[in-house]
Image: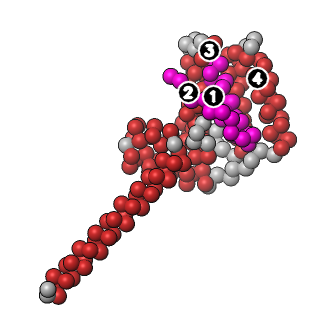
Amino acid sequence: MDNQTTVFVILGALLLVGLIIWFAMKQKRTDQLRNHYGPEYDRMVREKGSTLAERELIDRTRRVERLALVPLAPDKRQHYAEQWKQQQARFVDQPVAAVEEADHLVEEVMMECGYPVAEFEQRVADISVDHPQVVENYRAAHEIAVRERTGQASTEDLRRAMLYYRNLFMELLGVGPVPRQAPSR
């Protein structure tokens, strides 16, 4: 083999190794995002395709990392837990008001923890970073609350909304994981 052929073989081998490393790193990133975000990753890929979904999830993570998030102090946690109990009891006689207040309590706790509570889609995106397993519940609860405002939600829908809100609420309080309630559509 002459020198020129040797150089081309070496360059080709280096290019091949570089491509293998690049694909392995891309697959590792995909696996990490899929493992972390779970159903949220799958939903984003269905909506936007894998490249855009992954870019957005990475951007979400970076955005939330810049937030000054703090766990609730024990006295605040107790205060909010008591407010939640009141809303659950209120549900029996006033389901609409209880769901509206549950939505408000989730926002209030988010704000207390340091999440910006601008528009709903931004709240969902921010929450998905640290609470990816319950973010779909938050979406489902919110959608039921919106339907209720136009009179299109049944009492059973409102009951499910309370359960969905509770899942996120308890995680925000730092009470620990509660049994997951997968949203039914």
Q: Which mark is residue 183?
A: 2
Residue type pointed to by label 4 = Gln
Q: On the image, numbered disc 4 is attached to which residue?
A: 87
Q: Which mark is residue 127?
A: none
Q: On the image, numbered disc 3 is attached to which residue?
A: 156
Which label's residue is closer to the chain start, 1 or 3?
Answer: 3
Image side of residue 116 versus residue 10, left or right: right
Disc 1: CA contacts within 10 A as few (<14), some (14-19) or many (>=20): many
Mark 1 and 2 residues: CB-CB less than 8 Å, in contact? Answer: yes
Residue 150 is situated, as x and y percent measured from the top left of the image, at 56, 14
Q: CA distance from mark 4 to mark 3?
A: 16 Å
| Residue 6 against residue 93 in the figure, above or below | below
Q: On the image, numbered disc 1 is attached to which residue?
A: 164
Which residue is depicted at the point 19% across and 78% down? 8
Which label's residue is closer to the chain start, 2 or 4?
Answer: 4
Residue type pointed to by label 1 = Tyr
* Residue range corresponding to the magenta coloring: 158-185
Examine the image and state in which quarter residue 172 appears.
top right
Which residue occupies the foreground of this view, 109 or 31?
Answer: 31
Element type at marker 4?
A: helix
Residue type pointed to by label 2 = Pro
Residue 12 is situated, as x and y percent measured from the top left of the image, at 23, 74
| Residue 59 against residue 98 in the figure, above or below | below
Which residue is depicted at the point 80% across and 23% down? 86
Which label sits in the foreground, 1 or 4? 1
Q: Residue furthest bottom?
A: 3
Q: CA distance from mark 1 to mark 2?
A: 7 Å
